[in-house]
Image (cartoon, rainbow, N blue to C red):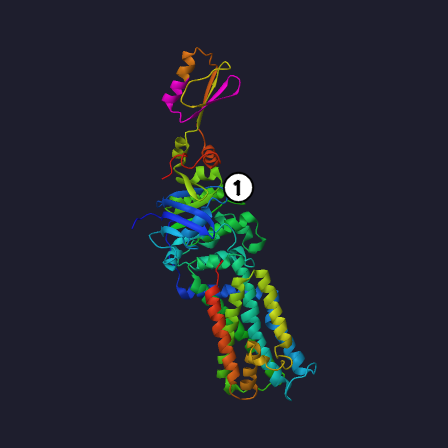
Amino acid sequence: MSDDAVEVRDVVVRYGATTAVDGVSLTVPRGRVFALLGHNGAGKTSLLQVCEGFRAASEGACRVLGLDPIRDHDELMPRLGIMLQSGGMYPWATASELLHLFASFSANPIDPGTLMDRLGLHKTAKTRYRRLSGGEQQRLSLAVALVGRPELVFLDEPTAGMDTEARHTTWQLIEELRADGVSVLLTTHLLDEAERLADDVVIMREGRVAATGTPAQLTAAAGIDHLEVRAEAGLKPEVPFKVTEATPGEYTIAGTLDAAAIASVLAWFAREGAQVTAVNTRRRTLEDVYLALTAEQLTTGKAGAGR
Amino acid sequence: MTTFAPAPARNTTKAILRSQIRMELLLTARRGEAVVLAMGVPLLVLLGAGLTHVTNVPGGDRLAYVVPGVLALTVMSTAFTGQAITTGYERSYGVLKRLGASPLSRPGLLFAKTAAVLALIVLQLVVLAAVGVAVGWHPHVTQILPALGVTVLATTAYSGLALLLASVLKPETTTGLATLIYVLMLAAGGIMFAAPGGVSEFLPLAAHAEALRATLSHDQPVPLGSWASLSVWAAVCVVAAAKKFRWE
C-alpha cells in the first residue's frame, strides 16, 4: 500500500449514457497542493466525489490515505476535510453554530473563534447561513473543512464567489496548510489560482487527463513559447517551427524554443541578410498552456505530458 | 505557528450525537410553522372539538374520543409531515450529504434525527395529555405500555413514509403532499368526528387513534385490527425507505 494521500487508477464515472470521467489515473503525494484544472463539465467534481466517497467509480480504483473511501467511510471521514462546491449547511443555523457543530465532532478541534477571525468571519458569527453572501458561505465551508485538523483536504472550487481580498486570504491559508503538512486536492478553473498554489497540476478535458506536471513543467512541455522578430516584410523563414507574419515585418515563431532553437532561428535571419530591428521572447503562462490544451482543434494525444 | 498541523481525532460518539441532536432540536424550535404544526393545531383541535359541540363524536364522553385522536394526530404531524418536509429540504441543501461525510457518519445522522423526533414527540404528548387531563380527560394510566407500543409502531411507519417521500420527490412537492395528507387526515381521519366506515382499518392515523382510545380512555386492549394495520404500515414503509433513501 502506498503512502500517498490519494491514489486514483483508471477511474471511470458514468451517469447513464454520459461518461463524466473516462479513465483517469493520478497520484497526490502527501504534503503537497494538487490542482485539478479544467472547464466546467471536464469531470473534476465527479472525480473529487469518488475520492470523497460520495460516488462509487463505475470502473477503476481509488485509495485515500490508504483507505477505500466507500468501504472504510467512517474510519476515513474524521481524517478528511471536505469543502463542497456549494451548500451542505443548515440555512437556518448561524455561522458560529455551524462551525461549533462540526468542531464538536472532533476531539481536539481548532478553536472556532480563531478560525473565524482568520477567515474574516467574526462579523458574521451570528448571521444565519442563508443570509451570508456567496463568498462568506464559501469561507465558512472552508472553516468547517479545516476545523477538525485533517490530514487531507478536498476543496471543490474553493474561491468561487469570493472577492479579491477573500481570495488572497484563502490562498495564503492554503499555502499555510501546505507549510503545516496538510495535503490538499483542489479543483479550480482559475489559472492564476493553480499557478500560484499548486505543486502539481492535472489539466482535465472531457473526462480525461490532458496534461500533468508542475506548472513549470507544463509551460515548458507545451511547446508554445513565442519568439517575435521584426525585420523587413515578406520573408519566408525556413525553420522547423510555426511561423506567422500577422502584420508585415512582424514574425512570430512558436514552438519549444530553448536557447539553441532561438539561435538557429536568428541564424536564418542572419544568413538572409535581414535587417532585424527587434527580437523578443515570451515564455508562456499556464493560461496559454491551458487554452492550447483545451482548444477544440488540438487533440489530447498530441498535447504533451499525459501519463 | 503550526495552526493546521494535522491531528485528526474523532470525538466520542456520545458527544457527537449529543451535539447533533441539540442542533436538530434547535432548528425545529426556530421554524415557526413547525412549532404551530407541532403544538398549535393539536391544542386548537383538543380544546375546540373536546370542549365544544362543533362536531358530532361517537359516545357520550367527548374528551375520551378527542384527546387520544389529538395525540395520534400529533405523532403523525411530527414523525411524518414535519420530518418529510425537513428531510426533503436538508437533502436538497446538501446537508444530509455533508453531515454524512463528517465524523458524525450516516448512521449517526439517522440516529440523531430519530432521537430528536422521539424527544419532540414525547414532549408534545406529555404537554397535550396534561392539557387534556386539565380540562377533564380521565386516562387509564395502567394501559400506558400498550399505548406506547402502538405509538412507537406508528412513529416507525410515519418516519419510513416521511423518508421515502423526501427521497423520491422534490422538496417542494414533498412539502405540498405531506401538508395535504396532514390536512386530509385532520379533516377525515377520525380525529374530530368518526371516520367513514372501514377507513380505520387501513389508515395508520385512525388505527393509532382507535388503539389509544381503547387503551387510555376505555381501559381495553389494543384492537387486533390496529396492531395489524400499524404493523403492516411500519414494515412496508421502513422497507421502502431503506430501499429508496437518498443522501443527495
The answer to which quarter of the image holds residue B175 is bottom right
Q: Nearer the viewer, residue A21 or A221?
A: A21
Q: Residue furthest top?
A: A273
- In the picture, residue B170 is in which quadrant? bottom right
The residue at 38%/51% (across/down) is: A59
> In which image quadrant can residue B50 be found?
bottom right
**On the rendered structure, is B196 left or right of B121?**
right
In the image, residue A252 lies in the stretch drawn in magenta? yes
Q: Is residue B15 left or right of residue B175?
A: left
- Whether residue B96 can be seen here: yes
The x and y percentages for residue A10 are 37, 47
**Residue A134's x, y, as percent?**
56, 49
What's the magenta region?
Answer: A243-265
Mark 1: secondary structure: helix
Dot 1: chain letter: A
Q: Which residue is mark 1?
A: A165
Viewer-proximal residue, A88 or A51? A51
| Residue at the (37%, 50%) spot, across then down | A60
